Amino acid sequence: MKLEIDIPEYDPAKGLKVIWENNFEIKAIKMGDDFVIEANKEGLISLAKQMLSIAYNDLFSGFHIHYEESTCLEKGSASFVIELK
């Protein structure tokens, strides 16, 4: 399978445009020593596009996106951060 994906360019004035697929659902669960990301197809695609955006925009080390219940995660989710090393 071959896919074509448009990755938004980073704009220093506006930041990184975060794109969400319609009807995305993402839940993050802390289970002992494990951290589980549970998502529907649209949620997984959204996260994948965001990680590709971070990887391909030549951003600085430490650039990150916060994922929280108050912004994009389902109720009861644990917060997490994806950061560029």
Image (cartoon, grey):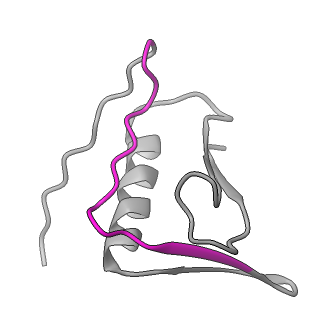
Q: Main secondary structure of the magenta part?
A: loop
Question: In the picture provided, is 10 more to the left or to the right than 39?
Answer: left
Quadrant of the frame with the N terminus: bottom left
Residue 28 shown in magenta: yes
Which residues fall within the magenta stretch?
Answer: 13-29
Q: Nearer the viewer, residue 59 or 42?
A: 42
**Please, which residue is most extreme toward the right here?**
32
Q: Position of residue 19 (x, y in %)?
A: 33, 48
Q: Position of residue 7 (x, y in %)?
A: 26, 43
Q: Give the residue at x 56% y 64%.
A: 73
Is 23 rendered above or below residue 21? below
Question: In the picture provided, is 23 more to the left or to the right than 64?
Answer: left
Q: Nearer the viewer, residue 5 or 66?
A: 66
Residue 62 shown in magenta: no
Q: Nearer the viewer, residue 56 or 44?
A: 44
Question: In the picture provided, is 51 more to the left or to the right than 68?
Answer: left
Q: Give the residue at x 38% y 20%.
A: 11
**Please, which residue is most extreme toward the bottom here?**
32
Q: Position of residue 16 (x, y in %)?
A: 43, 32
Residue 18 position by quadrant: top left
Q: Nearer the viewer, residue 67 or 3?
A: 67
Is 9 rendered above or below residue 82? above
Is 3 rendered above or below residue 27? above
Q: Give the residue at x 42% y 51%.
A: 50
Quadrant of the frame with the C terminus: top right
Is 15 rendered above or below residue 83? above
Q: Position of residue 48 (x, y in %)?
A: 39, 62
